[in-house]
Image (spheres, helix red, strand yellow):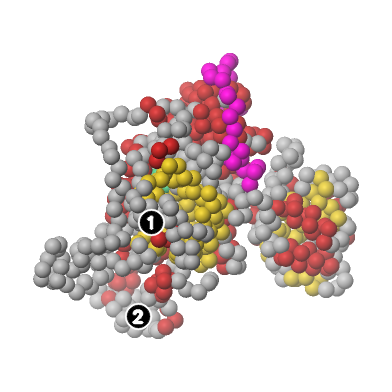
C-alpha cells in the first residue's frame, strides 16, 4: 500500500492486534482456560456463575446481523481517487477541483440477488459502490456495472426484487434469474426489456471485478460556485478492459471456487497489481435536456457515448484489502444521499426512491441510528451536531446543550457560514398525481440499439442466455410473453429465442429495426492486455526446463501471473535433471480457474500428462472455453490427445500458438493470444467438455 492517508490513520485507532496481550474476557479479565466450562465435578452440570462461558456463548449467539436485502454478497477494498484537472467550471466539490489532492475511497462490489454465501459467478448485475472520503464529507457513488436499470419508478423495486429472488414457497433458485417469477414480471413489465438485454449479455458474467465498467446509472447534477447546474452521468472504465467469463465456465466456477471474483480482487491487491479505473463524465448543459429522444430522468436509458462523449476526469486505484470483512465490508453503509456540495440529485423517480431507501435499510441492518460512527463509515471531515443517544453510541459529546439555537453552550456548534451543502434551487410545479411521464413510454428503442451494437459472438451469447433462462421457465405463457416483447426489440432475435424454447416464432416484425448502433456498447471494442492474467503451465517429470524458465520470465515481464501445475505439489525433475518448483497440484485446480494454458515441451513430461485424465481434460476444457493455448515442441502431442485442432507445428490457429522454443517471438505471440481474452471465432460445439 502507498503511505497511509487520513482515512487509514483514522482506522488505525480502531485496529486491534490480538497478539498485543493475553486472552481476556470482554471486561479485560485474563483467561487461562477457554476450552472447559466451569462445572460441578468433572462430569457434572455447568455452573451459571461461569461468566466467561456465558459471555462467550452469548456473544456468539448474537454475532449475525441481517444481510443486505439486495447486494448481500460482496467484496471491498480501499484506495484513492485523484482528478486530472480541476472541474471547477462544473462543480464546487473540492475533490473534483483539486488535481493535487488524493481522496481516500472504499469500494464494495457485489452481486444483487444471491445471499451472502452464494457464488460469485452467477448471471447477475454487479454492484459497484464507491465511497469518497472527501474533506467536505462522504460522497457515495452507489452504482452498478450496467448503465441502466430494470424499472423506472422506485415504487416497483419491491415487486422486482421479490420476482428475482428465490421463489417464496420453496426458496429456489439461489442467486439465479432463470425461474418463473422473474420472467413473469419481465414479460408483464416492458420497461425491463432494455436491462434484460444487458442481463442476458456477457456483462452479467464479469471475469473480474477489476474488469468491469461502473455506472452511476441515474442522471445527477453538478453545481458550480455560481450555482449553475450541469446534468452528469458517471462512468468507471477499467484499465484492463471489460471482459467476461463463458456461461458454461461460470456455472463450473460456482462449484470449483464460489469466491472466484472475491479472491481475484483480494489476490490482485495482495500482489501489488492494483486495480485501476478511470472516472468519466457525460456532461449535458441544463439547456440541452430536451434534445434527446428519451428522458434524462429515465433510468432505463443511456445517453449513447456517440451523442455525448465520456470525458475522462480522474483515476481510482484500489491498493489495500480490508483487515476484517465484517467490520469493514459488511458494515459499510452506502447511501445515495451522502453527497457533498457541488453534486446534487435530479427528479429521476428511481433516484428519488433510493434517497429514502438506503438510510432506512441501514437502520435495520446495523441496528440503530449510530452506524455512521462505525470506523468504515466515519467521514474524515469533522462531525458536530445535536444527534444524541441511540443504540451503540460511541461519542462522548462534552456539552450540556443538545439543541439549536442555544446560548448555554455558546451557540455551538455554529451554523456553517461557507461551504455548506445548498440544495439546487430547481423550480418545480405541478399537480399531485400518480402518473408516469409520456417521455418514459418508449421501452424498446434502446434495447434495439443495444442488440444492434453487439458483435456476432455477443449476439450468440445473448440468444443462448435467453434460451437457457426461458428454458428453465415452466409456464409456457411466460415464455411466449417474453418472446412477444423481444419481437419489439428485433424480429430475428425473437425468432432465434422462440426456436430454442419451443415457442411459436412470431411470423413478422411489429416494428422496423432502424439499425442504429452505439459501438461503445460492445465488449469487442474494449482494451486488451495480458497483465494479471492467470496462466497455467502444465508439467511432469522430464519437462524441458528452458521452456518453463523462459516462459515464466517472459510472462512475468508482462505482469501476467503464471502458475506451474503438476500431478503433485513440490517439484518435478526436468529432462536436464534440474528441479522445477510446482505452484499447485493439478487435483486442487481446474482449467476454469485460469485465463490461458501453456504446455512446455519434453517428451517424458508430455507422455505422463497424456496419460493423466485430469490434464487432458484441462486442455480440452480450456479449448472449449476459447482460451489461449500455447504448446512448445512435444507439447503439441498433448493438444492432439486432447483433440485440440492444431493444423501444423508452427501455426497460430484461433488462439492456439505453437512454437519450438519459448523465445521472445513465441512469448509475444502467446501473450497477444492471452490478451485477446477469448477466441470466440473457434468452433467448439463438438468439443466434449
Ligand atoms: Fe440499490 N439498494 N436500490 N440500486 N444498491 C441497496 O442498500 C434500492 C438501485 C446498489 O455495497 C440496499 O445498503 C432501491 C440502482 C448497490 O453496500 C437498499 C432501488 C442501483 C448496492 C437498496 C435501488 C443500485 C445497493 C440494500 C430502486 C445502481 C450495494 C442494502 C429505487 C445505480 C451497496 C443497502 C453496498 C443496495 C435499495 C436501485 C445499486 C435496500 C429502493 C438503480 C451497488 O437500500
Marks 2 and 1, Cα distance to the nearest angstrom?
A: 50 Å
Estimate the x, y position of residue 84 in percent, counting from the top left: 52, 59
Q: Is residue 358 above or below residue 400?
A: above
Estimate the x, y position of residue 43 in percent, counting from the top left: 34, 75
The residue sitting at 89% across, 50% down in the picture is 649
Element at label 2:
loop
Which residue does the numbered mark 1 point to in the structure image?
A: 92
Estimate the x, y position of residue 673 in percent, counting from the top left: 75, 51
The magenta segment: 499-526
Which quadrant of the figure has residue 437? top left
Q: Is residue 97 above or below residue 687?
A: below
Which quadrant of the figure has residue 200? top right
Front-most of 562 and 663? 663
Which residue does the numbered mark 2 point to in the structure image?
A: 24
Q: Earlier in the sequence, mark 2 or mark 1?
A: 2
Front-most of 25 and 666? 666
Judged from this view, the residue extending furthest toward the front is 226
Give the crowd class for mark 2: few <14, some 14-19, many >=20 residues within 10 Å: few
Residue 509 colored magenta?
yes
The residue sitting at 69% across, 46% down in the picture is 678
Amino acid at each position: 500500500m502507498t503511505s497511509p492517508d487520513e482515512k487509514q490513520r483514522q482506522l488505525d485507532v480502531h485496529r486491534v492486534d490480538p497478539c498485543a496481550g493475553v486472552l481476556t474476557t470482554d471486561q479485560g479479565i485474563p483467561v487461562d482456560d477457554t476450552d472447559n466450562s466451569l462445572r460441578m465435578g468433572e462430569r457434572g452440570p455447568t455452573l451459571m456463575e461461569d461468566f466467561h462461558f456465558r459471555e462467550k456463548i452469548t456473544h456468539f449467539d448474537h454475532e449475525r446481523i441481517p444481510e443486505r436485502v439486495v447486494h448481500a454478497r460482496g467484496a471491498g477494498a480501499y484506495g484513492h481517487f485523484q482528478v486530472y484537472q480541476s472541474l471547477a467550471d462544473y462543480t464546487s466539490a473540492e475533490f473534483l477541483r483539486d488535481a493535487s489532492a488524493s481522496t481516500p475511497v472504499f469500494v464494495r462490489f457485489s452481486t444483487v440477488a444471491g445471499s451472502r454465501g452464494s457464488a460469485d459467478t452467477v448471471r447477475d448485475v454487479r454492484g459497484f459502490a464507491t465511497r469518497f472520503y472527501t474533506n467536505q464529507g462522504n460522497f457515495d457513488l452507489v452504482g452498478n456495472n450496467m448503465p441502466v436499470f430494470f424499472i423506472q419508478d422506485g415504487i416497483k423495486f419491491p415487486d422486482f426484487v421479490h420476482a428475482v429472488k428465490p421463489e417464496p414457497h420453496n426458496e429456489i433458485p439461489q442467486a439465479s434469474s432463470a425461474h418463473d417469477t422473474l420472467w413473469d414480471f419481465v414479460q408483464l413489465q416492458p420497461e425491463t426489456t432494455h436491462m434484460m438485454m444487458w442481463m442476458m449479455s456477457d456483462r452479467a458474467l464479469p471475469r473480474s471485478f477489476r474488469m468491469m465498467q461502473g455506472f452511476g446509472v441515474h442522471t445527477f447534477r453538478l453545481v458550480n460556485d455560481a450555482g449553475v447546474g450541469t446534468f452528469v452521468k458517471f462512468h468507471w472504465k477499467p484499465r484492463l478492459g471489460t471482459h467476461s467469463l463463458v456461461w458454461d465456465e461460470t456455472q463450473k466456477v460456482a462449484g470449483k471456487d464460489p469466491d472466484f471474483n472475491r479472491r481475484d480482487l483480494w489476490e490482485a491487491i495482495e500482489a501489488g497489481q492494483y486495480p485501476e479505473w478511470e472516472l468519466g463524465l457525460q456532461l449535458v448543459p441544463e439547456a440541452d435536456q430536451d434534445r434527446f429522444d428519451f428522458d434524462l430522468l429515465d433510468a432505463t436509458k443511456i445517453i449513447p457515448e456517440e451523442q455525448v462523449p465520456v470525458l475522462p476526469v480522474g483515476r481510482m486505484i484500489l491498493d489495500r484489502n480490508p483487515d476484517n470483512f465484517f467490520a469493514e465490508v459488511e458494515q459499510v453503509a452506502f447511501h445515495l444521499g451522502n453527497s457533498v456540495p457541488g453534486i446534487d440529485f435530479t427528479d429521476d423517480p428511481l433516484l428519488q426512491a433510493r434517497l429514502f431507501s438506503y438510510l432506512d435499510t441501514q437502520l435495520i441492518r446495523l441496528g440503530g441510528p449510530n452506524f455512521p460512527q462505525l470506523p468504515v463509515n466515519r467521514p474524515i471531515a469533522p462531525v458536530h451536531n445535536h444527534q444524541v443517544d441511540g443504540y451503540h453510541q460511541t461519542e462522548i459529546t462534552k456539552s450540556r446543550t443538545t439543541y439549536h439555537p442555544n446560548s448555554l453552550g455558546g451557540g455551538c456548534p455554529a451554523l456553517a457560514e461557507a461551504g455548506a451543502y445548498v440544495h439546487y434551487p430547481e423550480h418545480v410545479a405541478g399537480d399531485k398525481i400518480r402518473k408516469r411521464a409520456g417521455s418514459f413510454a418508449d421501452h424498446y428503442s434502446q434495447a434495439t440499439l443495444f442488440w444492434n451494437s453487439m458483435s456476432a459472438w455477443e449476439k450468440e451469447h445473448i440468444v443462448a442466455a435467453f434460451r437457457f433462462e426461458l428454458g428453465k421457465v415452466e409456464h409456457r405463457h411466460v415464455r411466449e410473453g417474453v418472446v412477444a416483447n423481444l419481437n419489439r426489440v428485433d424480429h430475428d432475435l425473437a425468432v432465434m429465442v422462440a426456436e430454442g424454447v419451443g415457442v411459436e416464432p412470431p411470423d413478422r416484425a411489429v416494428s422496423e429495426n432502424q439499425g442504429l448502433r452505439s459501438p461503445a456498447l460492445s465488449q469487442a471494442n474494449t482494451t486488451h492486455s495480458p497483465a494479471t492474467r492467470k496462466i497455467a503451465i502444465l508439467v511432469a517429470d522430464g519437462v524441458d526446463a528452458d521452456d518453463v524458465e523462459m516462459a515464466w520470465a517472459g510472462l512475468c515481464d508482462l505482469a501476467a501471473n503464471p502458475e506451474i501445475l503438476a500431478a503433485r505439489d513440490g517439484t518435478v525433475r526436468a529432462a536436464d535433471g534440474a528441479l522445477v518448483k510446482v505452484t499447485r497440484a493439478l487435483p486442487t485446480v481446474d482449467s476454469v480457474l485460469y485465463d490461458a494454458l501453456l504446455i512446455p515441451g519434453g517428451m517424458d513430461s508430455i507422455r505422463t500428462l497424456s496419460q493423466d485424465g485430469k490434464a487432458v481434460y484441462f486442455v480440452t476444457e480450456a479449448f472449449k472455453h476459447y482460451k489461449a493455448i500455447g504448446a512448445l515442441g512435444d507439447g503439441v502431442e498433448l493438444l492432439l490427445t486432447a483433440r485440440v485442432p492444431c493444423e501444423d507445428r508452427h501455426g497460430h490457429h484461433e488462439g492456439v500458438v505453437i512454437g519450438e522454443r519459448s523465445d521472445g517471438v513465441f512469448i509475444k505471440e502467446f501473450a497477444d493470444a492471452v490478451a485477446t481474452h477469448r477466441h470466440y471465432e473457434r468452433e467448439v460445439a463438438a468439443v466434449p467438455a
